[in-house]
Image (tube, grey):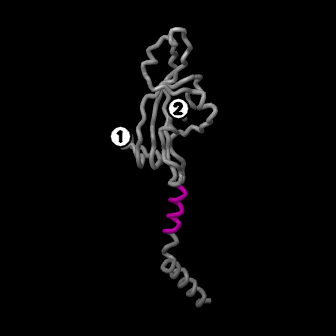
Amino acid sequence: MKIKRGMQKLASAYWPTKYRFVPALGGVVIAAVVGCVGPLVKIEQIDPKVASRVEVIHDKSILKKQNVNKLGIVEATSCKQLLWQPDSSIENCTNQLKMKASRLGGSAIVFGYSEGRNADFLPEAGVNRNCWNTVDCSAVVIINKPNSDDK
């Protein structure tokens, strides 16, 4: 019996030296699982039929016309979260704006701005949005009522 106890102690002392990589491997697995979160920004699902019903207007002077009803400002972010996904784009961001405008009841958006970033980290806010690159954009949602003067 004393021999078996001695062997057990020897085996338990032998395991940490032989398999040192096991705790490190466990740490890598945990880091991989914890790091697999989606983008930390709201991404709109795009329905092409709905998005095609909303017009994009780049001329901001339309906002001064009497037949235009402003519903509010919408913002969107196009995000490339995984390496195999397509790059973020103004087109995707604009389509997300159209989806939000449609939900508000708008018939058009007046495009405001767009800004692209790589390795998206916002140092002024201390926020990492978990995207390789992003395009942020905003627009004013309007209802453009037909008017006999605007023909």
Q: Name the side, left or right, on which 98 lies relative to 138.
A: right
The residue sitting at 55% across, 57% down in the picture is 33
Which of the image's four quarters has the N terminus?
bottom right
Residue at the front extreme?
151
Decide which of 75, 84 is in the foreground and name it.
84
Q: Position of residue 148 (x, y in %)?
A: 54, 9
Q: Which residue carries the number 1 mark?
A: 124
The residue sitting at 47% across, 48% down in the picture is 131
Which of the numbered marks, if any, corresponds to residue 97?
2
Numbered range of the magenta stretch: 24-34
Residue at the left extreme?
124
Q: Position of residue 139 (x, y in %)?
A: 47, 28
Would you say residue 129 sits in the magenta stretch? no
Q: Name the side, left or right, on which 105 lies relative to 75.
A: right
Determine the main secondary structure of the stretch shown in magenta: helix
Q: Earlier in the sequence, mark 2 or mark 1?
A: 2
Q: Are marks 2 and 1 in contact (CB under 8 Å)?
A: no
Would you say residue 26 sits in the magenta stretch? yes
Q: Position of residue 86 (x, y in %)?
A: 52, 49
Amino acid, disc 2: Leu
Q: Is residue 101 above or below residue 85?
A: above
